[in-house]
Image (cartoon, rainbow, N blue to C red):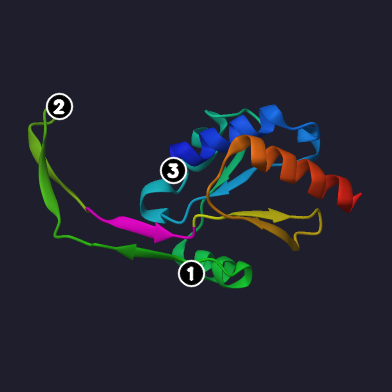
Amino acid sequence: VCPMDLGKISQTLHKMKQKNDLQVVFVSVDPDRDIGKMNAFAKGFNGGFVGLSAFEDELRTISKKLGVYHQVVAAQEKAKSHSHDEHSSAEHKHYEVDHTTSYLLLNPQLALTAILSSPHEPAAMAKALDEIITTLR
C-alpha cells in the first residue's frame, strides 16, 4: 500500500472543481497483508475513499481486464521476530509487491476512460480530471 499515492489523490481532489463527480477506489494487490484492512486505511486519507482487497485469483482477473501488472518479488526467507508481549517468536514473511503505478479512471459503466501516468502532480491531475469529467457529460 502506498500512502504517498493516497495523499496525492486526496490533494488532487481538494484542487478539483468537480470532485463530487469522482469516486476514488483504491484496490490493494497484496492480499496477504491487506485483506480486510483496505477500507479503513483508505478512509484515513479521505472519508469518501473506498479501499478494496481481493484474493490473488480475483486480482489476476481484474489486472488482466484492466491491463495492469502486479507480482510478488524479492521473496526472502521467513524472518523470526521476538514478540515482547508474548515472549515467543513469530514468523513474518518478507517480500515486496511490484505493480503498475498509473491511476486508472473508469466511467460510471466501469469502462476504462483514462490512464494517469507518473509523475502524479496534484494540480495537473486535478485539471486533467476536471476536463475529462466535463467531456464525459
Q: Which label sits on residue 111? A: none
Which residue is drawn at the image coordinates 22% and 53% (left, top)?
94
Which residue is drawn at the image coordinates 74% and 32% (left, top)?
16
Which of pointers 2 and 3 lies earlier in the amino acid sequence? Answer: 3
| Nearest-to-viewer mark from 2 and 3 | 3
| Residue 115 % position (x, y) | 65, 58
Disc 2 secondary structure class:
loop
The residue that disc 2 covers is 85
Which of pointers 1 and 2 lies earlier in the amino acid sequence? Answer: 1
Q: Is residue 129 above or below residue 123?
A: below
For badge 3, the amino acid type reads Cys
Q: CA distance from mark 1 to mark 2?
A: 35 Å
Is residue 128 found inside the magenta-colored segment of the image? no
| Label 3 neighbour load within 10 Å: few <14, some 14-19, many 20+ | few
Which of pointers 1 and 3 lies earlier in the amino acid sequence? Answer: 3
- The stretch in magenta equals 94-100
Is residue 97 found inside the magenta-colored segment of the image? yes
Front-lying residue, 111 or 88: 111
**33 left or right of 79?**
right
Disc 1 secondary structure class:
helix
For badge 1, the amino acid type reads Asp
Q: Is residue 117 above or below residue 122?
A: below
Q: Are marks 2 and 3 in contact (CB under 8 Å)?
A: no
The residue that disc 1 covers is 57
